[in-house]
Image (cartoon, rainbow, N blue to C red):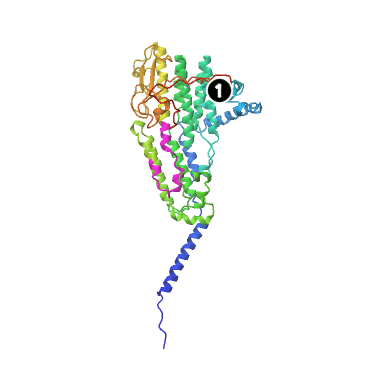
Amino acid sequence: MSRKKKPVYRLRNVILAIVLLIGLAIGREVYLALTATPGSSENFPAKVAALIEESQPPGVPPESPDAFEILSRVIPIESDMHAPYRAGPQLPNGHYPIDYTALRGPQSRKFYGAALETIQANSRKMIEDLRATEFYSLLDEAAAARRAVRPTPLSGDVIGFLLPHLGKYRNLARLNSARMYLAHQSGDESELARAFEHGLAPGRVAGHGSFLIEYLVGVAIHALMVSELREELVERPVSEQTLLKLLAVMDRQELPSMRWAIEGERLGTLDTIQWTHTDDGKGSGRLIVSKVSSLGPMLASGDNILEGAGAWRILNIAGAAFPSKAASVRRANEFYDAAQAAIALPHYQRNTASADLEAMAEAIPKRYILLRMMLPAWGKAIQSMDQIECQWQGTKVMLAIEIYRQRHGRPPASLDELVPGILPHLPKDPYTGSHFGYRILDPGTDPHGRAYLLYTAGRDGTDNGGVQAKQPYDAFRTTAGKGVDYVLNEPRLPPEPDEAPDATPDDEPTPEPPAPEGTMPPTQPTPE
């Protein structure tokens, strides 16, 4: 009698089949983890180079002089001349022997102590000694060159590009702002205008880069230079001829649009997504965890769920738990598109856009590990863009007012009198979309001798009559800016007084005056 054939689908076989399938799935995942290869279908470094070319002024031929290349020859001249100062006797408290900002103040003994005069003398001597070199003539060439192309590697990781020139550019700006100050004090208006353009040029060149940090360095440089200029115009009048030169300088050295930095950051983000994901040939792929861990210090930024992960390939199994390459690309493009849309509007039309971008970045789920690490703080960056636009346009208006005073012996009754005789059109306050705030002061009423106040409404968008906060930049902050404006023709801060010598045991301590009845004793301001 034949035995009854057992069914193949009995429980044991089903379990074995399930175990086999699980084993195959695990084996497949292990294989994929160990063999995960980054995608390389797009050459993003080449796209960055093309973007920088696209940012150049229209009509400037590629073979024309390049300001970036010229500045690369300027920087070593000044740097090499530091050697004798570094080799000299060490200054008290280890201060570096040169600091150009020490020439234009305000400075105090509290910071420099006994080294102050030495640092000032060294810095002044350096500025003069550079006249025996081609330093200033090369700066003339850089300022005149319309083309400014930062050399870009055509391979490698975009986020690995080095930008060592940025610190040098800021040093050039500090040097030239000090030159402006010295020229103004001596009445050398030709040198003042030349130094102003020499200082602005590195900012313009930095703005032609492809990354946010380059744009922000350009912002910082331009803010330093126009701030110094406005303080000088308050201190002492300048001839109409020089004022017209300064206006022309500003037309030549404008900062490029922030949109180039946004596109450059987009390319850097997309490049990083590409080399940290596999490529399935259909525009997507899986996260390569071992590649993400190679980002090193960046892993410490934000709430990173991969912090501490090593570079072992077996960890790539976890890639399946993260969003796909296509999903990350889509999210990144949505964010950068929103950033481009935000900067296309003046501040008064998008007063919530900065906050919206910050909220948009914060709302990205933690699983999008790369995006949460890489998306910059665009809200604050856009605020910086608004501030420099305000200061830049406000400085032009101030120059035009001073030209009017030279021609008529008085300030204009209203800003409308500046057009079309001096300015082709009247710049708008980006915080209101209308004229900058302007008030004529009664003669002899201003302790600094000003004939007028020129100001921006600032962050609250309200004309508060030129009332300024104790900390002027509070006007650009969301909370502190309520009820205050930012005065553009604010005088230079006076030098801080030297510290009183320490009391000796024989000295009677000086009592502090009592606070008025019903008031609290003064306290140190709390930083924001």
State left or right for residue 140 relative to residue 405: right
In this view of the protein, which residue sits in the foreground, 24 or 340?
24
Q: Can residue 60 be seen at all in this image of the molecule?
A: no
Q: Quadrant location of the N terminus?
A: bottom left
In this view of the protein, which residue sits in the foreground, 13 or 493?
493
Residue 7 image offset from top left, x and y in percent: 40, 77
Residue 236 image offset from top left, x and y in percent: 47, 15
Say which element carries label 1.
helix
**Residue 371 sits in which quadrant?**
top left
Q: Does residue 256 lie above or below 298 as drawn?
A: above
In this view of the protein, which residue sits in the foreground, 237 or 326?
237
Residue 481 image offset from top left, x and y in percent: 38, 29
- The stretch drawn in magenta includes residue 58: no
Q: Does residue 23 lie above or below 111 as drawn?
A: below
Q: Can residue 446 be seen at all in this image of the molecule?
A: yes
The range drawn in magenta is 359-385
User: Looking at the image, which residue is at 60% across and 28% down?
Assistant: 93
Q: As shown in the figure, which amino acid type bears the numbered disc 1? A: Arg
State left or right for residue 100 relative to residue 352: right
The number of numbered discs placed on residues in the rendered structure image is 1
In this view of the protein, which residue sits in the foreground, 344 or 223?
223
The dominant secondary structure in magenta is helix
> Label 1: which residue?
109
- The stretch drawn in magenta includes residue 376: yes
Q: Quadrant location of the C terminus?
A: top left
